[in-house]
Image: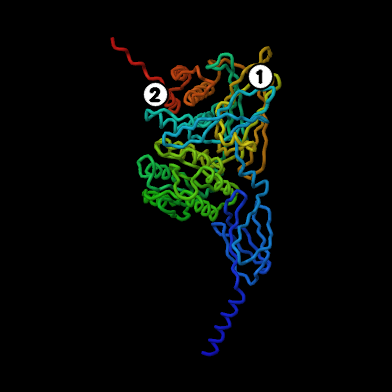
Amino acid sequence: MKALAGIWLFLLAATAVNGQYYLRGEIRDERGRLLEGVKIQLTSRGSFPYYSGTAGTFGITTTAMYDTISLSMDGYESFRCFVDTRRFQNLQLKMLPTTAHLYAKKLLSQTTDLRNAQQAIFSTQGESYNNQVENVFINASQYPETGFALNIDKASYSNIRRFINNGMAVPADAVRIEEMLNYFDFTKGFTQNHTEFQYRTQLSSCPWEPKNQLLFIHLQAPMLDLDKIPPSNLVFLIDISGSMDKPNRLPLLQSAFKMLTQNLRSIDTITIVTYGGGVGVALSPTGGDQKQKISDAIDSLTASGDTPGEGAIRIAYDLAKKSFIRNGNNRVVLATDGDFNVGQTTERELEDMITAYKKTGIYLTCLGVGMGNYKDSKLETLSKKGNGNFAYIDNLQEAQKILVKEFTQTLYAVANNAYLKIQFEPGSIAAYRLIGFDNKLNATEDSTSELEGGEVGSGHSMIAVFEIEPKAGAEKKTGDKLAMLSLQFKSANNGAAQVQTFPVPFQFTEINAIDSCYRFATAVAMLGSVLKKSKFTRNLLPEDVLSFARTVVNVSDPQQNEFLLLTEKMVRIYQPPKKKKKD
């Protein structure tokens, strides 16, 4: 016993000598964000590494009263300094230029060397939307080059439909015309099973301003071979907080995710994370062939509690990283009304958080639901910064469209950081205005903002529209070059940067004679302009949009026919019949 007691006293003494100091601290970047996973080394500990925890903090025992600490992390400059181990350390790592670039404010469209200082009006009606600044006419001789981001976001159209179907006016900032155009299928005229972007252009007359013209730029993305679609690692991140306890929220999402499950294969992996009162894992990684198990987990969800969205997103990404499939489709699918009320909740805080995950190779799809407290601004911010896409589900048919019919477009990217630049020929036009692709107000106010590309899904087709003021006295012949397009993107397969260039010939045709898809796209742009109360279409009345739509809509196409019915409802809301005066 005496021998054992001696050994015990010796160990106590050794501990007192060897661990008498405890170095504690936290590590942030220059934006004040706490950094997790920073590699820490102390000179007294040799090459043995320590790492900062989830809150950016650390605690290390040492025998030295004074020591030298070294910090390193991918994307940041290495840091080394002398420290007093008795004091709490507040340390900072500086971002490398490539990392700082990710956090820069981004633009949806940009005219080279031009800065816009306009203001915008913010509409809420109990919901939140990002302030927008509408694109204006640009002098083509002074600023001949402009560009815009490509993406497959479609949320705005179905959200607008929800307002109009409920007999309500649409908040102007809820209208994003490029997303309205993205909603429709414009694949007509392109070959199938192609491996490169295809394009078409058309110049035509402008229905709301006879002296101007419309230029349509029509692109279709490469299509994945359905037999060679890579395996997926999907994390369903589902909001089950108290605000989701309504038929058009959690129950709608449960039906949507069960429909998506039917498309899964045995090589796909599904994880389900929920948040409501806390964060939980409703389903650990499970093969896509275990459809009943996945459906049972979805059916078991009930809504209650607060909304710790920030913590849930972090856990979802951590689980996605643990199940990461190299050369696969790794994606978090977030479904919520966007009403985060615990943790980081502002757009700026969420933007900083999600940007840090962008370089993980994990995509983000945001599915919005609900009304009254729907936070469109937060979901748009997350999808734009999270290398992802964004849709709004207002009914079961929309869920089927997004997650079944357009499954590969929604969940399988073929191009990242995709954007299109257009260089107009000197002397070809007087001025141009890009319709849609309006920037956030805070991005236009920042002189360091730059154009940010988007994610494009397999086989997605899109149309962009410019309103053009012809140059007086300029004679153009059919076939003359009007502009040059430069499409730039990174391959989703291997990350290689690619550029495709296309000429834009002068091919003018009156609007009543052009392809039906461009006439329909014009009607969509007109509806969006009226809902936005655009200053460039002040003379355009709701009934003018309806009259034009009736001449272009293919009533045998369900989506186009719905658009016509929606336009009729819009007229009744925005231009109600005048009451007859009593005698």
Q: Quadrant of residue 46?
A: bottom right
Circle on res. 429: 1
Residue occupying the far bottom of the picture: 2
Front position in the image: 37 or 322: 37
Q: Tell me the residue at 61%/58% (across/down).
A: 90
Residue occupying the far top of the picture: 583
Label 1, label 2: how many angstroms apart (C-alpha)? 38 Å
Front position in the image: 467 or 283: 467
Q: Tell me the residue at 57%/51% (across/down).
A: 33
Q: Tell me the residue at 62%/44% (across/down).
A: 102
Q: Measured along the vertical axis of the image, is residue 556 above or below residue 305? A: above
40 vs 322, left or right, is right
Q: Residues within 10 Å of mark 1 (few under 14, many from 20)?
A: many
Q: Quadrant of the C terminus?
A: top left
Q: Which residue is mark 2?
A: 573
Q: Say if residue 161 shows up in the picture.
A: yes
Q: Label 1 is placed on what type of residue?
A: Ile
Percent coordinates x, y for residue 5 in the rendering: 53, 86
Q: Measured along the vertical axis of the image, is residue 212 above or below residue 559? A: above
Q: Label 2 is placed on what type of residue?
A: Ile
Q: Measured along the vertical axis of the image, is residue 243 above or below residue 59? A: above
Q: Say if residue 556 shows up in the picture.
A: no
Lower sequence index among marks 1 and 2: 1
Percent coordinates x, y for residue 110 in the rendering: 63, 31
Q: Residues within 10 Å of mark 2 (few under 14, many from 20)?
A: some
Percent coordinates x, y for residue 136 in the rendering: 59, 25
